[in-house]
Amino acid sequence: MFNKRTKIKELLATEPAGREVTVMGWVRTFRNNQFIALNDGSTNQNLQVVATLGLLNDETLKRITTGASLKVIGEVVPSSGKGQKIELKAASIEILGDSDPEKYPLQPKKHSLEFLREIAHLRFRTNTFGAVFRIRHSLAFAIHKFFNDKGFVYLHTPIITASDAEGAGEMFRVTTLPFDNPPRNDDGSINFKEDFFGKSTNLTVSGQLEGELAAMAFSDIYTFGPTFRAENSNTTRHLAEFWMIEPEMAFYDIEDNMNLAEEFIKYIIQYAMDNNRDDLEFLAQRLADEEKQLPQDKRSELGLIEKLEFVLNNAFERITYTEAIDILLNSSHYKKKKFQYEVKWGIDLQSEHERYLVEKHFKKPVIVTGYPAAIKAFYMRMNDDGKTVAAMDILAPGIGEIVGGSQREERYDKLTERMEAMHVPVEEMQWYLDTRRFGSVPHAGFGLGFERMVQFVTGMTNIRDVIPFARTPKNCEF
């Protein structure tokens, strides 16, 4: 039976010398017709399997090549080799799947991350991506655990929607209408009444608005699902399909919102530190090696583990948007014209501005509040000054904005005013406005881009390297 196997991670952790075990995995290397480095993906560490001379015939030995999959039964024995305390003395070796060494695309050398994205299934077998995706799993598990332990209700919000939550307008259309000859109205516009849903529909950019409806009954909810942006952006920070965590809390103000977001980020980082130490140390070393190639001023001041510990051990700095603009205007960076984008009150902060605040000025994560109403979404609560809204963004070292949230506008008249001013169709949004008609309460929420969080924890510089199958402009492989 195949499920009687022991995982290599468990074997290396428990070192059960003298026990007979069954292991299965893929060959990393095979030396001297005797020593097999076997890996099953549970850890980056390989198990040394010793095939004593004479155990296998020549035909079988030839088939033990890099990438081949094996089932090995044998006895765990203390190892005399360097770097491992135990090894497996094989009693039998069965080849489950061959791997042609002439055609196997992974050679024992360093491959570029771009090349590895082209060979999706073998990419997962590399040490770098093994570490990244085990950490990604841990972070996802920690997110559910955090909210579950706080009594939040996990809500599945729709992937297909008729609303544009962000007002971004860059959405993927969902339709069954024929492209070559869609039904049209008298004025020539497309007649969406003939479409599958009887109206124009898109892939969602956020589950927040639907989440607000549920928060008005359960008090505390969260969503964790795929979101989509048809933004023609090929940067290292953007994906067309990505995952978002969006909690929504009734009876919360902006202060409560900031406190929860900071606690949440620290919790999931701590979970990865406690459960993926080996993977983090591997990635920390990888990052340090990469940065040796960079000029001194481009290198990080802290290593990966130090950066994560620093976030855990320090309270996030909290400043207003107005204070942030003042800091930027008074900086030597600004005076020496080192910013690519202009700095003045009213701008949407660019990544370079966010990173300056975090990495150069405060040298720790920063929460910025009180953004100009003109650059924020319609649902954010208007502050008493009439110019700013109760928004909050958390900025992290290396990537800039990692969380965006706000206290929501719970006052019906103020909300409809904002919607009309921002040309959000009030009639189509009656289902949303109902939350402000029947027992409205102060409430707040935020969104965390999951891939940006995985980037932050793993130290990977390109967001395409922290998602199993990247979806970007002109790229939808696999």
Image (cartoon, helix red, strand yellow):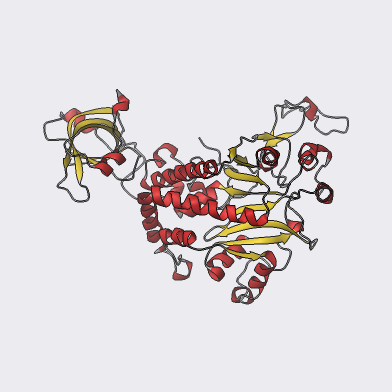
Residue 402 visible (yes or no): no
Instruction: Find the residue positioned furthest to the right.
Output: 186
Q: Nearer the viewer, residue 162 or 274?
A: 274
Residue 230: which quarter of the image?
Answer: top right
> Can you say whether 441 is above or below 194 in the image?
below
Q: Is residue 132 visible?
A: yes
- In the drawing, does residue 185 fall left or right of residue 301? right
Q: Residue at x 35, y 50 (%)?
A: 278
Q: Is residue 110 left or right of residue 424?
A: left
Of the pair 41 and 443, the residue shown nearer to us: 443
User: Which residue sits at x=80%, y=38%?
Assistant: 430
Q: Position of residue 423 (x, y in %)?
A: 82, 47
Q: Position of residue 260 (x, y in %)?
A: 58, 52
Vertical comparison of 330 with 70: above or below: below
280 left or right, relative to 414: left
Residue drawn 37% across the image and 60% down it? 289
Q: Give the percent coordinates (x, y) of residue 94.
A: 24, 27
Locate residue 352 relative to residue 29 in the image: left or right. right
Outermost residue toward the top in this view: 1
Q: x, y (%) of residue 268?
A: 49, 49
Quadrant in the rendering for residue 54: top left
Q: Quadrant of the N terminus?
A: top left
* Between 261 and 26, the one nearer to me in the picture: 261
Q: Residue at 83% across / 34% down in the picture?
A: 189
Count of marks overlaid on the render:
0
Q: Nearer the viewer, residue 244 or 382?
A: 382
